[in-house]
Image (spheres, rainbow, N blue to C red):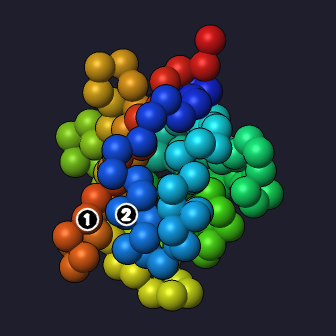
Amino acid sequence: FSGEWVLERSERCEAFLRAIGYSALIARTADRAEARRTIEHVGRELRCRCETVPPLAPARFAVLGVGEEELRTCDDAGREVLLLKPTWKGEVLCAGLRYLKPSHEMRLERYMEDGRMVEHLRYPSKGVDMRRIFKRCA
């Protein structure tokens, strides 16, 4: 996943964001913000810088250690989340994802598909999911 990535498109974004408590206006317009990810994969760590243009929240930097119990971070709008027990399943990075206020339990998978990086969020108890597809920056 190393490199600089920009959001190319989202799938099922609005329904997913509504399910986790965002307003209809935010849910309809969220995929219009330019989300960027800069990732450096070193050994068991992924060093990530996440930002949006226009800024929905301050840019954030996190070091994700595969195999750690949890990592406190924020989503693109600044809401606090915990990444839980990140692990590799083949070439897919999998983790639990818990929103803190209000509480939501879901799964995150990050993988490559047709040269694109995919963030796939699943919210099993609500029966919704969202895929965010990122392309490499030129």
Callout 2 crowding tier (Cα within 10 Å): few <14, some 14–19, many ≥20: many
Residue 96 placement, left or right of 60: left
Residue at 57 percent across and 29 percent down: it is: 5
Residue at 37 percent across and 74 percent down: it is: 19
Residue at 53 percent across and 46 percent down: it is: 31
Residue 131 to residue 108: above or below: above
* Residue 73, image x, y percentages: 61, 67
* Residue 24, image x, y percentages: 51, 68
Q: Is residue 26 visible?
A: yes
Do labels 1 and 2 touch, CB within 8 Å? yes
Amino acid type, mark 1: Val
Residue 96 placement, left or right of 78: left
Amino acid type, mark 2: Phe
* Residue 132, image x, y percentages: 42, 43
First along the sequence among labels 1 and 2: 2
Residue at 79 percent across and 57 percent down: it is: 58
The residue identified by callout 1 is: 128
Rounded to the nearest angstrom, the CA distance separating label 1 from label 2 is: 6 Å
Q: Is residue 85 visible?
A: no
Residue 6 to residue 14: above or below: above
The residue identified by callout 2 is: 16
Residue 98 to residue 122: above or below: below
Residue 102's label in the rendered image is none
Callout 1 crowding tier (Cα within 10 Å): few <14, some 14–19, many ≥20: some
Farthest top residue in view: 138
Q: Mark 2: which secondary structure? A: helix
The total of numbered circles placed on residues is: 2
Q: Quadrant of residue 80?
A: bottom right
19 and 119: which one is in front? 19
* Residue 59, image x, y percentages: 76, 52
Q: Mark 1: which secondary structure? A: strand
